[in-house]
Structure formats: structure tokens, C-alpha cells
Image: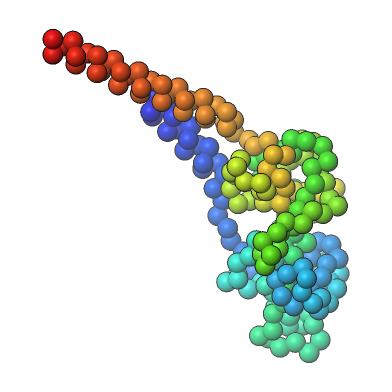
Amino acid sequence: MLSIFAVFKFDSASSFAFASKEPNLVKTTIETNLYAQPSLKSTILKKLDVGIVLTVDTEFLDDMFYKVSSYQIIEGACENDYSYVLKSHTLDNKISSPEKELDYNAQVKNDNSFLYTYDTNTKTYTKTNISLKKDTKVRILDGYDKNKEYTYISYQNESGEILSYYIETENLKVSGINYSVIVAISTLFTCVVIISIVFGIKGRKKKSK
């Protein structure tokens, strides 16, 4: 019984463990801002058109922003100058066919499920005017935890672009084994252990008599 539960638990956990690797080059998928700092309240240095290729500082890790080279993007910028762009408004420059690249592992559970951005400075989520329909396929990016309020996802819009935002976890339906099944197995396993202990104690008492 223990081995069965272990298999279910392992499969569930491994289904949502994804390696995080920043691309070397990204391109803008919509018109977006280039910020002086990794914050939506930061100074906007420039408005970027669609299709602008940016060089990413892969050593900088952030949930919301890429740190990109300002050289040849901003007039007068040097090779060591950096600025910031929203990850959700860019795409890995190597991806030529987003539909084939995006590996779905979840669906949207409810209609009008709004998406959110996350500000790492204020640690706050901001609601956007973008919403997804029920049954929209998405990819969970940073693991799934049903107890978290928000989950980081990617989805493909009607134009074929892949965008990344946060969504309320309660609006997600994950692929694979259902969480309630895991709970039921865990409860059953616990009951079996308790019953085994009780009968074991009773058996020892009878032998002692």
C-alpha cells in the first residue's frame, strides 16, 4: 500500500517540476515598454515595437522582468547599460513555431478567468484586462500548488503568440491525477496503518495471556 501511494505522489510532483532556463535572446510580441528598473512604476526609457530582438542577461533572475542590453536599442547607450522588459510581452527568439513549442499541462476551469502581473518590488499582483475562456489550454511554468493564490502560466493567444502571466490557482484544472484522489489514497493508507497497529497490539496482549 505504501508503494502505491509513493508512486502516485511521485508522479504528481514530477508532473509539475520544470527547469527554469532564461533564453539568450528574446523578441517583443506586442508593443511594450522598456523600463529603467524591474518595476512597473519605474521610468519608461522607450516604447518598443513588435519584433524587437533583445539580448538577455541570463544571470538576472526575476519572475516578471528580463534584464536586457540597452546597447543599440537606446540612443547613446553603452555595451554595459541594461534596462528591463516584461517577460509576458516577449518570446524566446529561437521559437519559430509557438504552437509546437508550448507543451500544455493544464486547462482553465472557469470563464472570464483574469490574468495578473507580479511586481517583485512591492510583492503585489495586479489584475490585467486580459481574461481566458473556460477550457483554454495553458502551461504551468513554476510548479503547481493548490494552496497558492496565484500560479505562473503561459498560453497561446489568437495571434499565435505565447504570453506568460499569473492566474488565480482556483481557476486552473491540472492534468494528471486529481488532488482529491491523492488525498483519498493518503487517508486510506493512514487508516490501514492505524488498523494494523491496533490489531498488532491486541494480538500481543492475547499471546501474553
The residue positioned 70% from the left and 59% from the top of the image is 124
- Horizontal side of 22 relative to 189 (left or right) equals right
Image: 12 above or below 34: above
The residue positioned 78% from the left and 71% from the top of the image is 41
- The scheme the figure's colours follow is rainbow
Q: Relative to the observer, which residue lies in front, 141 or 129?
A: 129
Image: 24 above or below 137: below
Quarter-of-image position of residue 134: top right
The residue positioned 57% from the left and 28% from the top of the image is 180
Q: Where is residue 155 in the image (x, y as percent from the top left)?
A: 74, 48
Q: Is residue 27 visible?
A: no
- Image quarter of the N terminus: top left
Q: Relative to the observer, which residue lies in front, 13 or 37?
A: 37
- Horizontal side of 10 relative to 193 (left or right) equals right
Q: Relative to the observer, which residue lies in front, 58 or 13?
A: 13
Q: Position of residue 158 (x, y in %)?
A: 85, 48
Quarter-of-image position of residue 46: bottom right
